[in-house]
Image (cartoon, rainbow, N blue to C red):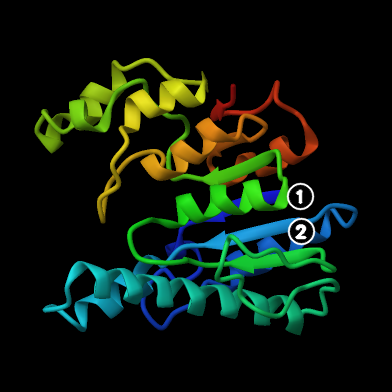
Amino acid sequence: MNIIKYGGSRVSPSAGVHDDVFIDSLIELVNGYRDQEFMVIIGGGALARHKQAQEPKADNDRKDWLGIEATWENAKYVIDRFVDSGVEGVYNQVIKNPHEKVGGHRIYVAGGYEPGNSTDYVTMLLARNYGASRVIKVSDFDVVKDISPLELAKYDKKDWSEVLGRTPDLNNATWRKMRELVGEEWKPGLNTPLDPLACGVGLESSQIELYICRENQIRNVLDGNLDRYVGTIIKD
């Protein structure tokens, strides 16, 4: 099974608006590999931020639930688009619990799970539960840089571009190396290449290979064209 994780803003770039062009491209991608299974994880994105802004006095637990509900709404919209497009083998319910396993279908769409973690963590739990060896996390940058976000935070934001520009690319990394970069503790809104809790699952599941890359690199991963791949590969 191929597991692909997208940020929620790819589906809903603003609250109440869906990017059908993107979803159609996702349908085209999945249809191009009819002999393979897919699990797509959708984040909360702009819809989550909108929901949270409507309850400014909400505590962290409630904010997490609002974000989770947004992932479910985004995921259900994607499922409905798949079904309406006549795609066969689509499971018509949102996967909400990464510890439960559903079978008999080719395409699944998942959202968040519970407060205290991110969809990165859910993605890795799903990979472990479904026995997937390949996970793709779609990013908005080309490659992970060999610098800890905590180290980067010591600089003024206006200097981040310059600092990252002189920081080496991390094209290949072990799970242990990623743990060194992202730490062990997850906090809401944490800005790291990978959720520390998700990294912990990777450390425990050595069969999983994670590809962090831009959207235009997905086919290179699926086709095994790693000589053309631009991004970061994490594996033991």
Residue lying at the far right of the rendered structure:
35
The circle drawn on residue 96 is none
Determine which quarter of the picture holds residue 118.
Answer: bottom left
Q: Name the kind of residue labelled 2 in the image.
A: Val
Residue under numbered circle 2: 30
Q: Name the kind of residue labelled 1 in the image.
A: Met
Q: Residue at x 19, y 25 (%)?
A: 151
Q: State whether residue 45 is above or below residue 53.
A: above
How far across and how far down the image is residue 191, in percent? Answer: 29, 45
Residue 203 falls left or right of residue 193: right
Q: Secondary structure at mark 1?
A: loop
Q: Secondary structure at mark 2?
A: helix
Q: CA distance from mark 2 to mark 1?
A: 12 Å
Residue under numbered circle 1: 1
Does the CB distance between marks 2 and 1 fall below 8 Å? Answer: no
Q: Residue at x 31, y 17 (%)?
A: 167
Q: State whether residue 108 is above or below residue 143.
A: below
Q: Quadrant of the C terminus?
A: top right
How crowded pointer 1 is (Cα within 10 Å; few <14, some 14-19, many 20+) is rated as some
How crowded pointer 2 is (Cα within 10 Å; few <14, some 14-19, many 20+) is rated as some
